[in-house]
Amino acid sequence: MKLKTLAKVGSVTLVTALGLAACGSSNSSSESGSTKTLNWQESANLPTLDPSKATDHVSAETLNNSNEGLLMVGSDNKLEPGVAKSYSVSKDGKTYTFNLRKSKWSDGSEVTAKDFVYGIQRTANPKTASQYSYLLDHVKNYEAISKNKMPVSSLGVKAEGNYKLVVTLSKPQSYFKYIVAMNPLFPQSEKAVKKYGSAYGTKSADQVYNGPYKVTGWTGTNDKWTLTRNKEYYNNSKTKVDKINFIVSKDAGTTLNQYQAGKLDVATLTGKQQVNNFKNSPELHKLPQASTFYLEMNQKKDPVLKNVNIRKAISLAIDRKSLTNDVLGDGSIPAKGFVPTKLASHDGKDFADAAEDSNETTNDVSYNLAEAKKYWAKGLKEVGKKSVSWTLLADDTPNGTKSTEAIQSNLTKLPGLKITNQNLPFKTRLANSQSGKFDLVVSAWIGDYPDPVTFMQLMESNNAYNNGHWSNAKYDELMTAAEGKDANNVNKRWNDMVSAEKVLMDDAGVVPLYQSVTPQVRKDKVKGLQYSNTGASYNFRDLYLK
Protein backbone atom coordinates (compact mmCIF):
# COMPACT_ATOMS: atom_id res chain seq x y z
CA MET A 1 0.00 0.00 0.00
CA LYS A 2 1.12 3.53 -0.62
CA LEU A 3 2.10 5.33 2.53
CA LYS A 4 2.06 9.05 3.20
CA THR A 5 5.15 11.09 2.48
CA LEU A 6 7.11 12.19 5.52
CA ALA A 7 5.92 15.64 6.53
CA LYS A 8 7.85 18.46 8.11
CA VAL A 9 6.39 19.99 11.26
CA GLY A 10 4.52 23.09 10.10
CA SER A 11 5.28 26.66 11.01
CA VAL A 12 1.96 27.07 12.76
CA THR A 13 0.44 25.16 15.65
CA LEU A 14 -1.16 21.94 14.47
CA VAL A 15 -4.49 21.10 16.06
CA THR A 16 -6.08 17.78 15.29
CA ALA A 17 -9.69 17.53 16.39
CA LEU A 18 -10.14 13.81 16.29
CA GLY A 19 -13.65 13.52 17.60
CA LEU A 20 -15.27 10.25 18.52
CA ALA A 21 -14.52 7.45 16.08
CA ALA A 22 -17.30 5.32 14.72
CA CYS A 23 -16.42 1.92 16.12
CA GLY A 24 -18.30 -0.95 14.61
CA SER A 25 -20.77 -1.55 11.84
CA SER A 26 -24.43 -0.81 11.56
CA ASN A 27 -24.88 -4.52 10.94
CA SER A 28 -25.42 -5.93 14.40
CA SER A 29 -23.69 -9.25 15.01
CA SER A 30 -25.67 -10.02 18.13
CA GLU A 31 -28.82 -12.04 18.28
CA SER A 32 -31.15 -12.11 21.23
CA GLY A 33 -29.96 -14.65 23.78
CA SER A 34 -26.80 -15.56 21.83
CA THR A 35 -23.12 -14.81 22.23
CA LYS A 36 -21.08 -13.89 19.18
CA THR A 37 -17.74 -15.66 19.33
CA LEU A 38 -14.81 -15.65 16.90
CA ASN A 39 -12.12 -18.35 16.90
CA TRP A 40 -8.74 -16.97 15.82
CA GLN A 41 -5.65 -19.07 15.14
CA GLU A 42 -2.36 -17.81 16.57
CA SER A 43 0.98 -19.36 15.57
CA ALA A 44 2.84 -18.59 18.82
CA ASN A 45 2.14 -18.40 22.53
CA LEU A 46 1.50 -15.15 24.37
CA PRO A 47 4.66 -13.99 26.21
CA THR A 48 3.33 -11.13 28.37
CA LEU A 49 0.54 -8.66 29.08
CA ASP A 50 2.85 -6.08 30.59
CA PRO A 51 2.65 -3.03 28.25
CA SER A 52 6.15 -1.88 29.23
CA LYS A 53 7.77 -5.25 28.59
CA ALA A 54 5.91 -6.57 25.54
CA THR A 55 8.20 -6.68 22.50
CA ASP A 56 6.53 -9.19 20.20
CA HIS A 57 3.67 -9.17 17.72
CA VAL A 58 1.43 -11.61 19.64
CA SER A 59 1.57 -9.51 22.81
CA ALA A 60 1.08 -6.28 20.86
CA GLU A 61 -1.92 -7.69 19.00
CA THR A 62 -3.54 -8.81 22.26
CA LEU A 63 -2.72 -5.60 24.15
CA ASN A 64 -3.89 -3.42 21.26
CA ASN A 65 -7.40 -4.79 21.61
CA SER A 66 -7.58 -5.14 25.38
CA ASN A 67 -6.07 -1.73 26.07
CA GLU A 68 -6.10 1.67 24.44
CA GLY A 69 -3.55 4.45 24.18
CA LEU A 70 -3.92 8.13 23.48
CA LEU A 71 -4.35 7.36 19.76
CA MET A 72 -4.81 4.10 17.90
CA VAL A 73 -4.10 2.79 14.42
CA GLY A 74 -6.86 1.60 12.10
CA SER A 75 -6.69 0.27 8.54
CA ASP A 76 -3.81 1.34 6.30
CA ASN A 77 -1.91 2.95 9.19
CA LYS A 78 -4.57 5.61 9.65
CA LEU A 79 -4.45 7.24 13.06
CA GLU A 80 -7.74 7.30 14.96
CA PRO A 81 -8.74 8.78 18.31
CA GLY A 82 -8.17 6.61 21.35
CA VAL A 83 -8.50 7.84 24.91
CA ALA A 84 -7.46 11.24 23.55
CA LYS A 85 -10.39 12.87 21.78
CA SER A 86 -8.13 15.62 20.39
CA TYR A 87 -4.54 16.77 20.53
CA SER A 88 -2.36 19.71 19.49
CA VAL A 89 1.29 20.23 18.65
CA SER A 90 3.19 23.42 19.45
CA LYS A 91 4.74 25.59 16.78
CA ASP A 92 8.26 24.27 17.49
CA GLY A 93 7.06 20.65 17.38
CA LYS A 94 8.22 19.93 20.92
CA THR A 95 5.01 20.03 22.98
CA TYR A 96 2.09 17.64 22.51
CA THR A 97 -1.10 18.31 24.43
CA PHE A 98 -3.70 15.54 24.59
CA ASN A 99 -7.29 16.12 25.70
CA LEU A 100 -8.72 12.94 27.19
CA ARG A 101 -12.24 11.60 27.18
CA LYS A 102 -13.79 10.08 30.27
CA SER A 103 -13.14 6.33 30.34
CA LYS A 104 -12.73 3.47 32.79
CA TRP A 105 -10.59 0.48 33.62
CA SER A 106 -12.17 -2.97 33.56
CA ASP A 107 -12.42 -2.82 37.38
CA GLY A 108 -14.65 0.25 37.09
CA SER A 109 -12.10 2.84 38.23
CA GLU A 110 -11.43 5.96 36.16
CA VAL A 111 -8.67 6.22 33.58
CA THR A 112 -6.98 9.60 34.03
CA ALA A 113 -4.00 11.51 32.70
CA LYS A 114 -2.11 10.34 35.79
CA ASP A 115 -2.38 6.74 34.51
CA PHE A 116 -0.65 7.80 31.30
CA VAL A 117 2.06 9.60 33.25
CA TYR A 118 2.62 6.53 35.41
CA GLY A 119 2.65 4.11 32.45
CA ILE A 120 5.10 6.20 30.42
CA GLN A 121 7.33 6.76 33.44
CA ARG A 122 7.31 3.04 34.17
CA THR A 123 8.46 2.29 30.62
CA ALA A 124 11.23 4.89 30.97
CA ASN A 125 12.35 3.69 34.39
CA PRO A 126 15.60 1.67 34.07
CA LYS A 127 14.35 -0.62 36.85
CA THR A 128 11.56 -1.83 34.56
CA ALA A 129 14.14 -2.92 31.96
CA SER A 130 11.79 -2.17 29.09
CA GLN A 131 13.44 -2.95 25.75
CA TYR A 132 11.09 -0.45 24.15
CA SER A 133 12.09 2.41 26.42
CA TYR A 134 14.18 3.87 23.58
CA LEU A 135 10.91 4.98 21.96
CA LEU A 136 10.97 7.76 24.52
CA ASP A 137 14.41 9.01 23.52
CA HIS A 138 12.98 12.32 22.29
CA VAL A 139 11.04 12.96 25.51
CA LYS A 140 12.65 15.57 27.72
CA ASN A 141 15.18 14.17 30.23
CA TYR A 142 14.83 10.57 29.02
CA GLU A 143 18.52 10.16 28.29
CA ALA A 144 19.59 11.24 31.76
CA ILE A 145 16.90 9.05 33.34
CA SER A 146 18.01 6.02 31.33
CA LYS A 147 21.52 6.50 32.77
CA ASN A 148 20.19 6.90 36.33
CA LYS A 149 21.38 10.53 36.37
CA MET A 150 17.90 11.98 36.98
CA PRO A 151 14.77 10.66 38.71
CA VAL A 152 12.02 9.23 36.52
CA SER A 153 9.70 11.92 37.87
CA SER A 154 11.65 14.46 35.78
CA LEU A 155 10.53 12.87 32.50
CA GLY A 156 8.81 15.38 30.21
CA VAL A 157 5.30 14.11 30.76
CA LYS A 158 2.74 15.61 33.13
CA ALA A 159 -0.96 15.59 33.93
CA GLU A 160 -2.83 18.85 34.05
CA GLY A 161 -5.91 17.74 35.91
CA ASN A 162 -7.55 14.40 35.17
CA TYR A 163 -8.13 14.86 31.46
CA LYS A 164 -5.16 16.71 29.99
CA LEU A 165 -1.76 15.18 29.31
CA VAL A 166 1.23 17.27 28.20
CA VAL A 167 4.35 15.66 26.72
CA THR A 168 7.46 17.79 26.22
CA LEU A 169 10.11 16.62 23.77
CA SER A 170 13.77 17.61 23.79
CA LYS A 171 13.70 17.85 19.98
CA PRO A 172 10.98 17.59 17.32
CA GLN A 173 9.80 14.13 16.26
CA SER A 174 7.35 14.11 13.36
CA TYR A 175 6.25 10.51 13.98
CA PHE A 176 5.69 10.86 17.75
CA LYS A 177 1.94 10.70 17.09
CA TYR A 178 2.41 7.07 16.01
CA ILE A 179 4.54 6.23 19.04
CA VAL A 180 1.78 7.28 21.46
CA ALA A 181 -0.43 4.59 19.89
CA MET A 182 2.01 1.85 20.95
CA ASN A 183 1.71 -0.33 24.05
CA PRO A 184 4.80 1.05 25.89
CA LEU A 185 2.93 4.37 26.14
CA PHE A 186 -0.41 2.88 27.20
CA PRO A 187 -1.90 4.01 30.51
CA GLN A 188 -1.10 1.76 33.44
CA SER A 189 -2.86 1.56 36.77
CA GLU A 190 -0.36 2.19 39.56
CA LYS A 191 -2.80 0.48 41.91
CA ALA A 192 -2.75 -2.69 39.78
CA VAL A 193 1.04 -2.69 39.35
CA LYS A 194 1.53 -2.47 43.11
CA LYS A 195 -1.22 -4.99 43.83
CA TYR A 196 0.18 -7.70 41.55
CA GLY A 197 3.85 -6.90 42.01
CA SER A 198 6.19 -9.16 40.04
CA ALA A 199 3.16 -11.10 38.75
CA TYR A 200 1.79 -8.03 36.96
CA GLY A 201 0.91 -8.93 33.38
CA THR A 202 2.15 -12.52 33.70
CA LYS A 203 -1.38 -13.92 33.45
CA SER A 204 -4.72 -12.45 32.46
CA ALA A 205 -6.04 -12.20 36.03
CA ASP A 206 -3.05 -10.08 37.08
CA GLN A 207 -3.90 -7.10 34.90
CA VAL A 208 -6.62 -4.50 34.31
CA TYR A 209 -7.77 -3.33 30.89
CA ASN A 210 -9.13 -0.13 29.37
CA GLY A 211 -9.83 -1.37 25.83
CA PRO A 212 -12.88 -2.92 24.14
CA TYR A 213 -11.92 -6.35 25.47
CA LYS A 214 -10.28 -7.78 28.55
CA VAL A 215 -8.08 -10.87 28.46
CA THR A 216 -9.37 -13.98 30.22
CA GLY A 217 -8.25 -17.58 30.49
CA TRP A 218 -4.49 -17.04 30.17
CA THR A 219 -2.43 -18.67 32.91
CA GLY A 220 0.89 -17.47 31.58
CA THR A 221 1.85 -20.80 30.05
CA ASN A 222 -1.22 -22.16 28.26
CA ASP A 223 -1.80 -21.96 24.52
CA LYS A 224 -5.32 -20.51 24.67
CA TRP A 225 -6.69 -17.16 25.81
CA THR A 226 -9.80 -15.11 25.17
CA LEU A 227 -10.61 -11.48 24.50
CA THR A 228 -13.86 -11.00 26.40
CA ARG A 229 -16.06 -7.95 25.90
CA ASN A 230 -15.16 -5.22 28.40
CA LYS A 231 -18.43 -3.71 29.57
CA GLU A 232 -16.58 -0.79 31.17
CA TYR A 233 -15.15 0.35 27.81
CA TYR A 234 -16.39 3.81 26.89
CA ASN A 235 -17.52 2.64 23.45
CA ASN A 236 -18.85 -0.75 24.54
CA SER A 237 -22.18 -0.23 22.77
CA LYS A 238 -20.32 -0.36 19.45
CA THR A 239 -18.55 -3.66 20.18
CA LYS A 240 -20.20 -6.37 18.06
CA VAL A 241 -18.26 -9.55 18.94
CA ASP A 242 -18.52 -10.76 22.52
CA LYS A 243 -15.55 -13.13 22.60
CA ILE A 244 -12.46 -13.77 20.50
CA ASN A 245 -10.79 -17.06 21.33
CA PHE A 246 -7.09 -17.21 20.51
CA ILE A 247 -6.00 -20.77 19.83
CA VAL A 248 -2.31 -21.51 19.26
CA SER A 249 -1.78 -23.97 16.43
CA LYS A 250 1.76 -24.43 15.13
CA ASP A 251 1.21 -27.42 12.87
CA ALA A 252 0.14 -26.39 9.37
CA GLY A 253 -1.92 -29.51 8.67
CA THR A 254 -3.75 -29.34 11.98
CA THR A 255 -4.49 -25.65 11.48
CA LEU A 256 -5.99 -26.22 8.04
CA ASN A 257 -8.09 -29.15 9.27
CA GLN A 258 -9.46 -27.07 12.15
CA TYR A 259 -10.33 -24.23 9.79
CA GLN A 260 -12.08 -26.53 7.31
CA ALA A 261 -13.96 -28.22 10.14
CA GLY A 262 -15.25 -24.84 11.35
CA LYS A 263 -13.26 -24.87 14.58
CA LEU A 264 -11.33 -21.80 13.44
CA ASP A 265 -12.84 -18.74 11.78
CA VAL A 266 -9.53 -17.09 10.93
CA ALA A 267 -6.26 -18.90 10.24
CA THR A 268 -2.90 -18.43 8.55
CA LEU A 269 -1.94 -20.77 5.72
CA THR A 270 1.54 -22.23 5.42
CA GLY A 271 3.35 -23.20 2.25
CA LYS A 272 2.69 -23.07 -1.46
CA GLN A 273 0.27 -26.02 -1.56
CA GLN A 274 -2.07 -24.64 1.08
CA VAL A 275 -2.07 -21.18 -0.53
CA ASN A 276 -2.70 -22.62 -4.00
CA ASN A 277 -5.64 -24.62 -2.68
CA PHE A 278 -7.36 -21.32 -1.81
CA LYS A 279 -6.11 -19.22 -4.73
CA ASN A 280 -9.61 -18.84 -6.22
CA SER A 281 -11.40 -18.57 -2.89
CA PRO A 282 -12.81 -15.26 -1.57
CA GLU A 283 -11.77 -16.49 1.87
CA LEU A 284 -8.06 -15.96 1.04
CA HIS A 285 -6.56 -12.58 1.95
CA LYS A 286 -2.87 -11.94 1.23
CA LEU A 287 -1.87 -9.36 3.80
CA PRO A 288 1.39 -7.53 3.07
CA GLN A 289 3.51 -6.75 6.10
CA ALA A 290 6.07 -3.99 6.49
CA SER A 291 8.34 -6.61 7.97
CA THR A 292 11.75 -8.11 7.40
CA PHE A 293 13.04 -11.52 8.43
CA TYR A 294 16.79 -11.36 8.82
CA LEU A 295 19.83 -13.14 10.23
CA GLU A 296 21.59 -11.64 13.22
CA MET A 297 25.17 -12.77 13.78
CA ASN A 298 26.41 -12.74 17.36
CA GLN A 299 29.68 -10.83 17.20
CA LYS A 300 29.93 -10.71 20.98
CA LYS A 301 29.73 -14.50 21.38
CA ASP A 302 31.96 -15.44 18.43
CA PRO A 303 34.72 -13.04 17.30
CA VAL A 304 34.81 -14.81 13.92
CA LEU A 305 31.57 -13.00 13.10
CA LYS A 306 33.31 -9.66 13.59
CA ASN A 307 35.03 -10.31 10.26
CA VAL A 308 33.21 -8.44 7.49
CA ASN A 309 34.24 -10.95 4.81
CA ILE A 310 32.73 -13.79 6.83
CA ARG A 311 29.49 -11.84 7.14
CA LYS A 312 29.45 -10.98 3.44
CA ALA A 313 29.96 -14.64 2.57
CA ILE A 314 26.95 -15.61 4.69
CA SER A 315 24.77 -13.05 2.92
CA LEU A 316 25.83 -14.02 -0.60
CA ALA A 317 25.43 -17.74 0.09
CA ILE A 318 21.69 -17.54 0.78
CA ASP A 319 19.32 -18.10 -2.13
CA ARG A 320 16.44 -15.82 -1.17
CA LYS A 321 14.38 -16.46 -4.30
CA SER A 322 14.39 -20.18 -3.65
CA LEU A 323 13.57 -19.56 0.01
CA THR A 324 10.51 -17.44 -0.79
CA ASN A 325 9.28 -19.21 -3.95
CA ASP A 326 10.08 -22.86 -3.29
CA VAL A 327 10.32 -23.19 0.49
CA LEU A 328 7.81 -20.68 1.88
CA GLY A 329 5.59 -20.28 -1.18
CA ASP A 330 3.15 -18.05 0.69
CA GLY A 331 3.61 -14.81 -1.25
CA SER A 332 6.62 -13.60 0.73
CA ILE A 333 9.26 -11.81 -1.36
CA PRO A 334 13.08 -11.57 -1.18
CA ALA A 335 14.28 -8.66 0.90
CA LYS A 336 15.78 -5.71 -0.96
CA GLY A 337 17.49 -4.54 2.20
CA PHE A 338 16.84 -4.12 5.90
CA VAL A 339 13.93 -1.67 5.55
CA PRO A 340 10.99 -3.33 3.74
CA THR A 341 9.11 -2.01 0.74
CA LYS A 342 5.88 -0.02 1.14
CA LEU A 343 6.81 1.24 4.59
CA ALA A 344 7.57 4.84 3.64
CA SER A 345 8.17 6.97 0.56
CA HIS A 346 9.50 10.43 -0.22
CA ASP A 347 9.02 12.39 -3.44
CA GLY A 348 7.39 9.34 -4.97
CA LYS A 349 10.34 7.04 -4.16
CA ASP A 350 9.96 4.05 -1.86
CA PHE A 351 12.68 3.94 0.80
CA ALA A 352 13.66 0.36 0.01
CA ASP A 353 14.13 1.28 -3.65
CA ALA A 354 16.14 4.40 -2.79
CA ALA A 355 18.40 2.40 -0.46
CA GLU A 356 18.83 -0.38 -3.03
CA ASP A 357 19.81 2.16 -5.71
CA SER A 358 22.46 3.60 -3.40
CA ASN A 359 24.06 0.20 -2.72
CA GLU A 360 26.57 -0.46 -5.47
CA THR A 361 28.88 -2.91 -3.69
CA THR A 362 29.16 -6.65 -4.24
CA ASN A 363 27.37 -7.36 -0.99
CA ASP A 364 23.82 -6.81 -2.06
CA VAL A 365 21.11 -9.33 -1.25
CA SER A 366 21.45 -11.41 -4.41
CA TYR A 367 22.59 -15.03 -4.48
CA ASN A 368 26.17 -15.52 -5.63
CA LEU A 369 27.74 -18.69 -4.23
CA ALA A 370 30.99 -18.34 -6.19
CA GLU A 371 31.55 -14.84 -4.79
CA ALA A 372 30.47 -16.05 -1.33
CA LYS A 373 33.19 -18.73 -1.36
CA LYS A 374 35.82 -16.10 -2.20
CA TYR A 375 34.79 -13.93 0.72
CA TRP A 376 34.59 -17.00 2.95
CA ALA A 377 38.12 -18.16 2.10
CA LYS A 378 39.47 -14.68 2.62
CA GLY A 379 37.65 -14.33 5.95
CA LEU A 380 38.82 -17.72 7.28
CA LYS A 381 42.41 -16.81 6.45
CA GLU A 382 42.07 -13.47 8.25
CA VAL A 383 40.70 -15.09 11.42
CA GLY A 384 43.09 -18.05 11.29
CA LYS A 385 40.43 -20.74 10.96
CA LYS A 386 39.95 -23.70 8.64
CA SER A 387 36.48 -24.62 9.83
CA VAL A 388 33.63 -23.14 11.84
CA SER A 389 30.62 -24.66 13.64
CA TRP A 390 27.56 -22.59 14.47
CA THR A 391 24.05 -23.11 15.78
CA LEU A 392 21.23 -21.49 13.82
CA LEU A 393 18.34 -20.46 16.11
CA ALA A 394 14.77 -19.86 14.96
CA ASP A 395 11.14 -20.37 16.00
CA ASP A 396 9.58 -23.81 15.98
CA THR A 397 6.77 -22.67 13.69
CA PRO A 398 6.34 -24.39 10.29
CA ASN A 399 7.93 -21.44 8.49
CA GLY A 400 10.68 -21.22 11.09
CA THR A 401 11.59 -24.87 10.68
CA LYS A 402 11.49 -24.77 6.88
CA SER A 403 13.56 -21.59 6.80
CA THR A 404 16.35 -22.99 8.97
CA GLU A 405 16.52 -26.14 6.86
CA ALA A 406 16.88 -24.07 3.68
CA ILE A 407 19.45 -21.70 5.20
CA GLN A 408 21.40 -24.62 6.63
CA SER A 409 21.50 -26.19 3.16
CA ASN A 410 22.74 -22.92 1.65
CA LEU A 411 25.39 -22.10 4.23
CA THR A 412 26.95 -25.57 4.42
CA LYS A 413 28.03 -25.10 0.82
CA LEU A 414 30.72 -22.85 2.25
CA PRO A 415 33.74 -25.12 2.79
CA GLY A 416 34.40 -25.96 6.44
CA LEU A 417 31.11 -24.57 7.80
CA LYS A 418 28.86 -26.76 9.93
CA ILE A 419 25.38 -25.52 10.87
CA THR A 420 23.21 -27.12 13.56
CA ASN A 421 19.59 -26.01 13.61
CA GLN A 422 17.81 -25.15 16.86
CA ASN A 423 14.07 -24.48 16.59
CA LEU A 424 12.50 -23.39 19.86
CA PRO A 425 9.09 -22.10 21.01
CA PHE A 426 8.68 -18.41 20.23
CA LYS A 427 8.91 -17.23 23.83
CA THR A 428 12.08 -19.22 24.41
CA ARG A 429 13.64 -18.15 21.13
CA LEU A 430 12.89 -14.53 22.00
CA ALA A 431 14.53 -14.89 25.41
CA ASN A 432 17.61 -16.58 23.93
CA SER A 433 17.91 -13.84 21.29
CA GLN A 434 17.75 -11.11 23.91
CA SER A 435 20.25 -12.80 26.22
CA GLY A 436 22.73 -13.58 23.43
CA LYS A 437 22.37 -17.38 23.55
CA PHE A 438 22.87 -17.92 19.83
CA ASP A 439 25.45 -17.87 17.05
CA LEU A 440 23.07 -17.08 14.21
CA VAL A 441 19.39 -16.32 14.73
CA VAL A 442 16.49 -15.71 12.37
CA SER A 443 14.93 -12.53 13.73
CA ALA A 444 11.91 -10.65 12.43
CA TRP A 445 10.75 -7.09 12.81
CA ILE A 446 7.44 -5.54 11.83
CA GLY A 447 7.58 -1.77 11.51
CA ASP A 448 5.96 -0.07 14.48
CA TYR A 449 4.92 2.91 12.39
CA PRO A 450 5.31 4.10 8.77
CA ASP A 451 8.77 5.63 9.02
CA PRO A 452 12.15 4.03 8.14
CA VAL A 453 13.55 4.90 11.55
CA THR A 454 11.44 2.12 13.12
CA PHE A 455 13.92 -0.29 11.49
CA MET A 456 17.03 1.87 11.36
CA GLN A 457 17.11 2.50 15.12
CA LEU A 458 17.42 -1.22 15.78
CA MET A 459 20.96 -1.36 14.50
CA GLU A 460 22.34 1.58 16.45
CA SER A 461 25.21 0.41 18.65
CA ASN A 462 23.39 0.74 21.98
CA ASN A 463 19.90 -0.32 20.92
CA ALA A 464 18.40 -3.09 23.05
CA TYR A 465 17.26 -4.98 19.95
CA ASN A 466 20.73 -5.10 18.39
CA ASN A 467 21.16 -8.70 19.52
CA GLY A 468 24.14 -9.34 17.26
CA HIS A 469 26.07 -6.37 18.71
CA TRP A 470 27.04 -4.97 15.32
CA SER A 471 28.51 -1.50 15.75
CA ASN A 472 29.52 1.12 13.21
CA ALA A 473 30.46 4.71 14.07
CA LYS A 474 29.41 6.09 10.69
CA TYR A 475 26.00 4.45 10.96
CA ASP A 476 25.49 5.90 14.44
CA GLU A 477 26.59 9.33 13.21
CA LEU A 478 24.07 9.30 10.36
CA MET A 479 21.23 8.16 12.59
CA THR A 480 22.10 10.79 15.19
CA ALA A 481 21.87 13.42 12.46
CA ALA A 482 18.54 12.05 11.21
CA GLU A 483 17.09 12.22 14.70
CA GLY A 484 18.85 15.43 15.69
CA LYS A 485 20.04 18.33 13.57
CA ASP A 486 18.19 17.13 10.46
CA ALA A 487 14.97 16.11 12.20
CA ASN A 488 12.97 19.01 10.76
CA ASN A 489 14.52 18.85 7.29
CA VAL A 490 12.64 16.15 5.38
CA ASN A 491 15.18 15.84 2.56
CA LYS A 492 18.28 15.72 4.76
CA ARG A 493 16.67 13.32 7.22
CA TRP A 494 15.66 10.99 4.39
CA ASN A 495 19.14 11.07 2.85
CA ASP A 496 20.74 10.41 6.25
CA MET A 497 18.76 7.21 6.60
CA VAL A 498 19.33 6.09 3.01
CA SER A 499 23.08 6.55 3.59
CA ALA A 500 22.86 4.68 6.90
CA GLU A 501 21.16 1.72 5.19
CA LYS A 502 24.00 1.68 2.65
CA VAL A 503 26.55 1.50 5.49
CA LEU A 504 24.60 -1.35 7.09
CA MET A 505 24.43 -3.34 3.84
CA ASP A 506 28.04 -2.62 2.83
CA ASP A 507 29.23 -3.91 6.20
CA ALA A 508 26.76 -6.83 6.28
CA GLY A 509 25.68 -5.81 9.77
CA VAL A 510 22.64 -8.04 9.34
CA VAL A 511 21.59 -10.41 6.56
CA PRO A 512 18.10 -9.54 5.26
CA LEU A 513 16.18 -12.63 4.13
CA TYR A 514 12.64 -11.87 3.07
CA GLN A 515 9.63 -9.62 3.48
CA SER A 516 6.61 -11.56 4.64
CA VAL A 517 3.09 -11.69 3.34
CA THR A 518 0.47 -13.30 5.56
CA PRO A 519 -1.83 -15.62 3.59
CA GLN A 520 -4.88 -15.46 5.84
CA VAL A 521 -8.16 -17.31 5.35
CA ARG A 522 -11.36 -15.99 6.91
CA LYS A 523 -14.86 -17.34 6.93
CA ASP A 524 -17.27 -15.20 4.93
CA LYS A 525 -19.10 -14.22 8.11
CA VAL A 526 -16.07 -12.31 9.44
CA LYS A 527 -16.46 -8.63 8.58
CA GLY A 528 -15.01 -5.28 9.63
CA LEU A 529 -11.48 -6.46 10.48
CA GLN A 530 -9.09 -3.49 10.39
CA TYR A 531 -5.57 -4.29 9.19
CA SER A 532 -2.41 -2.21 8.93
CA ASN A 533 0.97 -3.37 7.66
CA THR A 534 2.78 -1.91 10.69
CA GLY A 535 2.42 -2.13 14.45
CA ALA A 536 0.00 -4.57 16.06
CA SER A 537 -1.65 -5.06 12.61
CA TYR A 538 -5.13 -6.04 13.79
CA ASN A 539 -7.77 -3.78 15.30
CA PHE A 540 -10.95 -5.61 16.32
CA ARG A 541 -13.02 -2.56 17.25
CA ASP A 542 -15.11 -2.65 14.05
CA LEU A 543 -15.25 -6.44 13.86
CA TYR A 544 -18.62 -8.12 13.45
CA LEU A 545 -20.02 -11.47 12.36
CA LYS A 546 -22.57 -11.42 9.59
Image: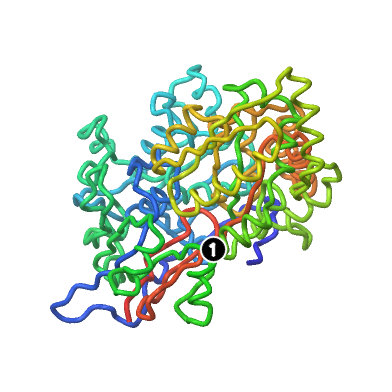
Q: Position of residue 405 (x, y in %)?
A: 55, 47
* Residue 342 x, y percent position in the rendering: 66, 60
Mark 1 Cα within 10 Å, few/some/many (few <14, many 20+)? few
Q: Residue at x 22, y 53 (%)?
A: 216
Which quarter of the image is occupied by the N terminus?
bottom right
Query: Is residue 509 at least partly visible in the picture?
Result: yes
Instruction: Tell me what residue is drawn at x 48 percent, y 75 percent.
Output: 284
Number of labelled discs?
1
Asked whether residue 52 appears in the rendered view, the answer is no
In the rendered structure, the answer to whether residue 444 lies left or right of residue 221 reads right
Instruction: Give 254 or 268, whichever is nearer the viewer.
Output: 254
Left or right? Give the position of 25 relative to 200.
Answer: right
Quadrant assignment, res 253: bottom left
* Nearest the eye: 66 or 232: 66
**Residue at far right of view:** 360
Write down the residue under mark 1.
78
Q: Position of residue 53 (x, y in %)?
A: 40, 37
**Which residue does the image show at 68% across and 38% down from the upper left?**
483
Q: Determine whether the residue tagged by mark 1 lies in a helix, strand or loop.
A: loop
In this view, 344 is above or below 238: above
Q: Quadrant of residue 171?
A: top right
Give the side of residue 530 with respect to residue 380, left or right: left
Residue 88: % across, % down: 54, 52
